[in-house]
Amino acid sequence: MLLGRVLPQSHIDELRAAVGADGLITGESQLQTYECDGLTNFRVMPGAVVLPRNTGEVQAVVRICARHKIPFVSRGAGTGLSGGALPAAGGVVISLSRMNHILEVDIANRFVVVEPGVINSHVTQRVAPQGYFYAPDPSSQSVCTIGGNVAENSGGAHCLKYGFTVTHTLGLEVVLPSGELVQLGSATLDAPGYDLTGVFVGSEGTLGVATKVTLRIVKRPEVVQTLLAAFDSPQAAGQTVSDIIAAGMLPSALEIMDALAIEAAEAAVHAHYPVCGGLLLVELDGPSSEVEVLMGQALEICRNNGAREIRVAQSDAERALVWKGRKAAFAAMGRISPNYIVQDGVIPRTALPSVLSEIDRMSSAVNLRVANVFHAGDGNLHPLVLYDRAIEGQEEIALDLSYRILHLCVDSGGSITGEHGVGKEKQQALGYMFSEPDLQTMQLVRCAFDPQNISNPDKVFPRPRLCADVPGPYKPHPLETAGIAEIF
Amino acid sequence: MSTTTTLTQQECLAHLASIAGQEHTQLCGETVAVAAADAQQIAEILRFADANGIAVTAVGGGTKLGWGNPVEAGIRLDMKRMNTVREHPWQDMTCTVEAGCNWAEMQKELAQNRQTVALDPLWPELVTVGGVVAANDGGSLRLKYGGLRDLIIGMTIVLADGTIAKTGGKVVKNVAGYDLHKLMTGSFGTLGVITEVNFRLHPVEVHARTWTATATDAARFAEPLRGLLDSQMTPSAVQVRVREQECALDVRIAALPECMDDHAGRLQKLFGQIELSETSENVWQARQKLFAIEGAVVLKVSLLPSDVCPVTTELQQWAAREDAEISIVAQAPGLMAVALKSSPDAAIALIKHLRGRLHGSGGSVVAQQFPEALRDGLDVWGCDSNALPLMREIKRRFDPNRILNPGRFVGNI
């Protein structure tokens, strides 16, 4: 493993030969662009950045890395929130931004083949005229790339009904960490052999570089209806979510915001939300006749749970405004707190009321505010711990609280991450969720793919050290500050 | 008994009895059968087998033991004692089930809260959860609910060296660590023994109706099938059935009762001149019936959805030419079960032809059931993936002494 922080000139020359002078970045100021992803408090300077144009160039770069045991990380738009695209010191960043072509569109068979640098929302734009869409919708979808989505197994608000990136990934072309090229899966189902596509998706760049992705596309539903219901508390909204699911409904989205999150969203985008303790957003889609009946049932369940005010978005514009407020909730925290930490944990849906109460108790005990924004349908919490760095010692307290909330999720039968990934941020937390034998078994897969441990090394798995990692305070990504991307 | 040591069968029997109890251990010809009570006992059994180089086959209902390449196992690990639904937090719509749990029994228990694992495997009354998962079986519901990879959220497995490992979890949304349960699904018991499976659940389809259209040529269905899949309707299952020269197209729709007439009207509109009539739910047993045709070769053919009707027609024409009998049940997402009765040479020639025909679009042909007479000349899996060396390396890491179903899977893994 390369320990120095600078790549030897001979290696840089080899990389230049592989991707051409215009595909290589080594200047320090340019390299700085790649020193972090959306989790900006981790920063490491890479040795070089390459911008391959095609699979052959990716292979050539990876072969060079394999020959000299140079660590590499592939990178899409760099919007990830767990430090997954953080470079290794002196390592190579394989930026896939120039591999951004949609290679094939097959409407009859409902799939597309894309290069990894294609932006998520561009897939939908391409198939929208035929009435189709690409379902996974992370809120950064206007800038994040399919390659990054594959690495993180990205979700989004609508994965409650439509599933995650893995649900929609049929096949992959992958450059293994040895430089060999393999085809995993295909546009058809159940290829004989191990489901390596299923294993690769969500492996956070540790098993190789995806250079082509075959994605399933979905017919756009006939009707979409969105309702907002105001409750006195997020617990009451949470109970409503459980009741909606228990009634046999599968809404396309079920989102909750608490009073703090509402206050922040209002301040940021004026979504005209009702002032309340817990706001529930329910979106139903499908054939018109069914949505109409189900919406009636959902309204009744909301009323039975004490909803004080219920609104149904009457137009696409109204629906867009509802979602704008929800999507802006993270970034809006800056309006009500100087600093904040974003967390991403999952709990069983029924644990929602008790976990929210416990978070209340924990935050009161340390005199900090925690705003709650969550994908309630699948129990994916995004607690936002608010604090002021200027007050001595408060950042440490906030970090500790945010970490204890994550443990609470695991203790409640859930997970340390529902969509942001483990990356650099939660390596130690993975060790809280899984036992050593579990982690060793995962390592068997890793070692089969990458025996030299050069593909995004020192990520995901706990490092062999005793001190626990702590999640960093939230710092806005430049894309977010510029209003290009929102964090969901 | 297949072993690399000089251990006698009696010694093996005695050791396994000391782990699982004498009443759960017996000799069955060349094999020692042992029924373990829990994952810890399985770990001890596998450690013993691994140390002594004894091949192990885990067995659930035993309905699919003939699938894949033959294995001469020294130990038959019977999963029947591990047969309970461990947890069913119905409001979370998940469950944890032991691998030896009978599929139909599991569904019965889940149905008490009107929930189900939305998958229709072969022989639900006979098979176990572990067997269905290891073979990645599933039927017509794939269209609406996806396959096992979409329904399994976690798993407990025991590796060849006795390591007990958990993967995934009990929540549907979870991206922590590698999804080893996806690797285990469909791995035919070659990487580890599955002891528990966590599923996401769906509501039982209470109000469902099935409509059928008939024709003499599957080509007639191409257009309505394309239209249906391109529509905003959400059928839970669609299949094309062929028996000799008679073809049928079945559509199952589950919906609120007050919306059913609306769906029926839309469906008939899509089918135009082709008449639809409401039929029994029994038509969804068609795939299973193919396996009961005596002496038939049964193939699992994976192909693009748009190839379903053309390939069906080609197979009908082939059967007419070769004087063979052919029955087909093709699920709309592009998974086709084909039963054929012909001369062995003709069957093998057809399999080769089909593999060549579908190769360009990524399709595949696996022989699932066949007369023993065919075995020698038959490549069961037909896997020419360039990822085969990687799969072998995964096998080597998980099971270095090759005790778990050695040779059964693709590339003799």
Image: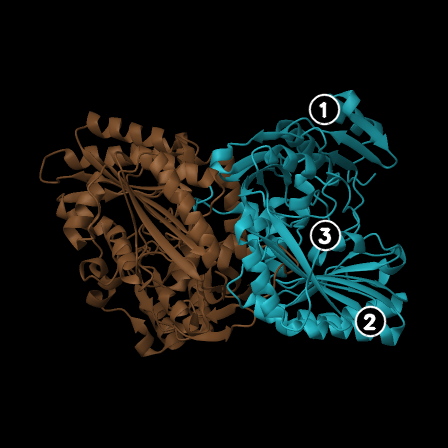
Q: Can you tell which mark lies on residue B280?
A: 3
State the separation of the CA atoms marked 1 and 3. 46 Å
Asked whether disc 1 touches disc 2, contact meaning CB atoms under 8 Å apart, the reply is no
Secondary structure state at the residue bearing disc 2: helix
Q: Position of residue A236 (x, y in %)?
A: 32, 33
Q: Residue at x 68, y 39 (%)?
A: B103
Give me the chain letter of mark 1.
B
Q: Which mark is residue B20?
A: 1
Compute the Cα span from label 2 to label 3.
36 Å
Q: Is residue A382 above or below residue B370?
A: above
Chain for mark 3?
B
The x and y percentages for residue B174 are 44, 44
| Depth check, front residue: B352 or B306 | B306
Under circle 1, the secondary element is helix
Q: CA distance from mark 1 to mark 2?
A: 47 Å
Which colour is chain B painted? cyan
| Mark 1–mark 3 CB contact (< 8 Å) | no
Above or below residue B259? Residue A7 is below
Q: Colour of chain A?
A: brown
